[in-house]
Each structure stands twice: as structure tokens, then as C-alpha cells.
Image: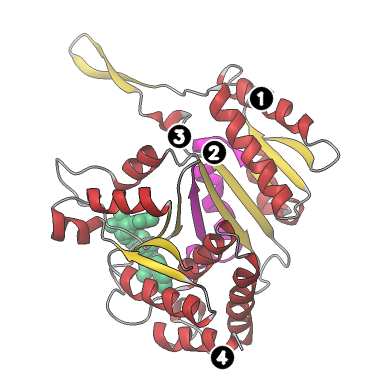
């Protein structure tokens, strides 16, 4: 029985990289029944809504989506796409793997960053404070960290480590200064870590030191777990260590749904030109296959993809080659054997 998955091709280069990904998965024999839906500008064009109900209904049904990049329409009355998806499905874990394909400055990076996606400073509790005539004399943003939210994200990181044969979880915090919010995250993290003692190593790093260690000796890190704001910043830093966003996949995971995506945007400057690199979405699709229990096929696709890049003869322009999206996709399919 094919597995139903919601496919949101997205805007800009989205449809072309989504098609490339679908072709590669089909060539690898993945039995998926794609339920094609729209969002972003395509959603506005069809339903006047960047997150149409039909798309949300499809994800409710399939519980798994592969999403191309979306353009959030500017203007009043439109909901923020990412916030709506995160809230609707309580996608609390943002998972961003980054690993070396072609050794550059670093030879052997293999980091999975697990970012808490629903709490912290990004919770949206903010206001201005009027003083005298100045309505914006001060501004206040509140960080909310809960025991529940901390426990489930740290547990997710440890369980991910166990399931993927990884050795160590590094918890990143700033509890030395933010003693309450970050202190709670650290306390809960230590408590969860004790349950995994002897199975997964645990270490703690303060965020500023972590930022430095990541650029000095990133090879020492394995799974990294942190709160929302720090995770937002560190995940881009980690992508930069292995060559930027073009090859960066991401997953947003909740208890009842998971959405897999490329980290980059719609690349309007190259849309419609058949030059986009489908790599990030292909790697996101591999994460999706693992999530669906088809890890062997995910490995096979990754192997073909990495082999194509290492061979260096058929590369898209962002990787220093001259191949188009279609040609690169054909090369990956040929490498599947
Ligand atoms: P971008 O990631 O779209 O583009 C940045 C640069 O990277 C551009 O030069 C682009 O050509 C290049 N690039 C990106 N992906 C590429 C690929 N697969 N192959 C080759 N080159 C690639 O970032 P931006 O220009 O800041 O954003 C454009 C639009 O994307 C905005 O509307 C933004 O809101 C949206 N966006 C969406 C998401 C998402 O849906 N997850 C994420 C980021 C940005």
C-alpha cells in the first residue's frame, strides 16, 4: 500500500525542485501517494489564502508533508505561513542536520541541530511601554519556557540520538545569566539526560562559547539541542559550516504531524530557469522516508546524491557547475543504479 503524503510544491523554484524530488523518489521505488496541495502565493491565487483549509485538511489526514519554499504575501489579513503550520500541528521540534559532502574547511562535520520551535522569546508576547509623550519609549519581549516544552524537546533529541545511532547530545543554554527561563531548560535537560545515562553521552555548553566552538572545532558535535532563539541562530551557523543553504534540509516534527522542507527560500532570481539545485528538498525527502520507516531507501538516495556531487561532473550552478535542475536530477537517478 502506498503511503499518502501531502505535497506542497510551493512558489518560485518550488515546483521545479519538488518535481525533481518526486522523480528521484519514484526512481528509487518509494511507494508514495502524493496528495498535491497549494500554499503561499499559489494558495492565494487559488483560494485567496496562503494556508488554505484544504491543505491543512490534507496534512491532518496524511500527517506527513513535503513542502517546497513558500512566499509569504505582504499585506494585511494574511496569516504567517510558518506560524500557522507550527501552531495548527504543534510542530515543536525543528530538526536541521548538516554534514560534510565535499570536504572544505572542515573534513568531517555531522551535526543534527534540534531547536525548540514553540516557546522562548519567539512566543509573541511583546509590547511597547509609553513614557510621557513617547509611545515607544521602551519595548518588552517575554521569553516563556515551560517544563513540558523543555522536557519534550530534550527527550526528542535523546530519542533521535538513540534511533540514529548517535553518541552524544549537547544541550546549549544561557542559564548563567537567564537563571529562571534558561535555568529551567537546563534543569529539565539534566533530568532527562539521566534517563539516558550509559546509552547517550550528555554535555552542556553556554551559547556564546558554543558559537565559538562550532567554528573552531565543529567535528566534536553530534546532536545539539537548544531553545528557540539560540536554535534559530545556530542552525544557520551550522548550515554555513557545510556550504550554505543550498544543501540544508529541515524537518518540523510534532506528535501528530511532520513537515519536511528545504531551508532555503523561493529564489525568485532564478525561478523558471531550470537552474535551481533540488538538493535541500531531496535531503528533506530522505528525512521524510526515515520518518516513515524507510531508512534503507533514504540511505540509498543519499548515497546516489552524494556520489553525484563528489563526482563533480554534473553540478548545478550554485555548486560550481553548469548543469540544469533536470540534468542534475537525471544524474542522481542514474547514480541510484
Ligand atoms: P532565498 O533562499 O530564496 O535565496 C537566497 C539566494 O540563494 C538567492 O540568490 C537564490 O538564487 C539562492 N538559492 C536559494 N535556493 C537555491 C537553490 N535551491 N538552488 C540554487 N540557488 C538557490 O532567500 P530570499 O531571497 O531571502 O527569499 C526569497 C523568498 O523566499 C521570500 O519571499 C521569503 O519569504 C521566502 N522564504 C521562504 C522560506 C520557506 O518557505 N521555508 C524560507 C526562506 C525564505
Q: Residue at x 23, y 48 (%)?
A: 53
In the rendered view, tell whether residue 65 sits above or below residue 117.
below
Where's residue 299, x and y in %?
Answer: 64, 71
Q: Earlier in the sequence, mark 3 or mark 2?
A: 3
Quick one: quadrant of the C terminus? Answer: bottom right
At label 1, counting other C-alpha atoms closer than 10 Å, the crowd grade (few under 14, some 14-19, many 20 or more) is many
Magenta extent? 225-254
Q: Which residue does the numbered mark 2 point to in the structure image?
A: 230
* Pointer 2 with pointer 4, Cβ within 8 A: no
Q: Which residue does the numbered mark 1 point to in the structure image?
A: 188
Secondary structure found at label 1: helix
Mark 3 and mark 2: span between their CA atoms?
A: 13 Å
Q: Which residue does the numbered mark 4 point to in the structure image?
A: 313
* Pointer 1 with pointer 3, Cβ within 8 A: no
Rendered-image quarter of ligand 1:
bottom left
Q: Residue at x 69, y 61 (%)?
A: 109
Q: Earlier in the sequence, mark 2 or mark 4?
A: 2
Q: Residue at x 14, y 41 (%)?
A: 76
Tell me: is circle 3 under 8 Å from ligand 1.
no
Q: Which residue does the numbered mark 3 point to in the structure image?
A: 118
From where the camera sits, is residue 94 visible?
yes
Residue 248 counted in the magenta span? yes
Where's residue 25, x and y in %?
Answer: 49, 75
Q: Residue furthest front?
A: 1
At label 2, counting other C-alpha atoms closer than 10 Å, the crowd grade (few under 14, some 14-19, many 20 or more) is many
At label 3, counting other C-alpha atoms closer than 10 Å, the crowd grade (few under 14, some 14-19, many 20 or more) is many
Tell me: is circle 4 under 8 Å from ligand 1.
no
Secondary structure found at label 3: loop
Amino acid at each position: 500500500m502506498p503511503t499518502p503524503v501531502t505535497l506542497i510544491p510551493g512558489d518560485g523554484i518550488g515546483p521545479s525542485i519538488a518535481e525533481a524530488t518526486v522523480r528521484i523518489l519514484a526512481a528509487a521505488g518509494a511507494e508514495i501517494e502524493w496528495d498535491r496541495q497549494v500554499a503561499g502565493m499559489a494558495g492565494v491565487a487559488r483560494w485567496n489564502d496562503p494556508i488554505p483549509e484544504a491543505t491543512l485538511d490534507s496534512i491532518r489526514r496524511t500527517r506527513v508533508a513535503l513542502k517546497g519554499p513558500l512566499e509569504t504575501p505582504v499585506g494585511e489579513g494574511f496569516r504567517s505561513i510558518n506560524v500557522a503550520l507550527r501552531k495548527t500541528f504543534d510542530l515543536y521540534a525543528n530538526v536541521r542536520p548538516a554534514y560534510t559532502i565535499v570536504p572544505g574547511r572542515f573534513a568531517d562535520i555531522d551535526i543534527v541541530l534540534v531547536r525548540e520551535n514553540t516557546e522562548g522569546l519567539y512566543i509573541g508576547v511583546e509590547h511597547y511601554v509609553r513614557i510621557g509623550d513617547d509611545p515607544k519609549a521602551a519595548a518588552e519581549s517575554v521569553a516563556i519556557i515551560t517544563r513540558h516544552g523543555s522536557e519534550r524537546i530534550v527527550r526528542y533529541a535523546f530519542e533521535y540520538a538513540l534511533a540514529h545511532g548517535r553518541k552524544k547530545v549537547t544541550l546549549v543554554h544561557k542559564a548563567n545569566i537567564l537563571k529562571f527561563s534558561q535555568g529551567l531548560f537546563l534543569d529539565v535537560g539534566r533530568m532527562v539526560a539521566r534517563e539516558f545515562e550509559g546509552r547517550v553521552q550528555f554535555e552542556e555548553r553556554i551559547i556564546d562559547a558554543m558559537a565559538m566552538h562550532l567554528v573552531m572545532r565543529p567535528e566534536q558535535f553530534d546532536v545539539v539541542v537548544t531553545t528557540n532563539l539560540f536554535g534559530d541562530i545556530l542552525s544557520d551557523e551550522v548550515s554555513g559550516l557545510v556550504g550554505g543553504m543550498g544543501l540544508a534540509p529541515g524537518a518540523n516534527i510534532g506528535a501528530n504531524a511532520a513537515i519536511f522542507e528545504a531551508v532555503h527560500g523561493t529564489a525568485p532570481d532564478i525561478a523558471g530557469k531550470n537552474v535551481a539545485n533540488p538538493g535541500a528538498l531531496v535531503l528533506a525527502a530522505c528525512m521524510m522516508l526515515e520518518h516513515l520507516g524507510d531508512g534503507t531507501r533514504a540511505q540509498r538516495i543519499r548515497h546516489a546524491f552524494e556520489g553525484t556531487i563528489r563526482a563533480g561532473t554534473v553540478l548545478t550552478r550554485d555548486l560550481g557547475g553548469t548543469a540544469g535542475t533536470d540534468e542534475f536530477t537525471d544524474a542522481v537517478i542514474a547514480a541510484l543504479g
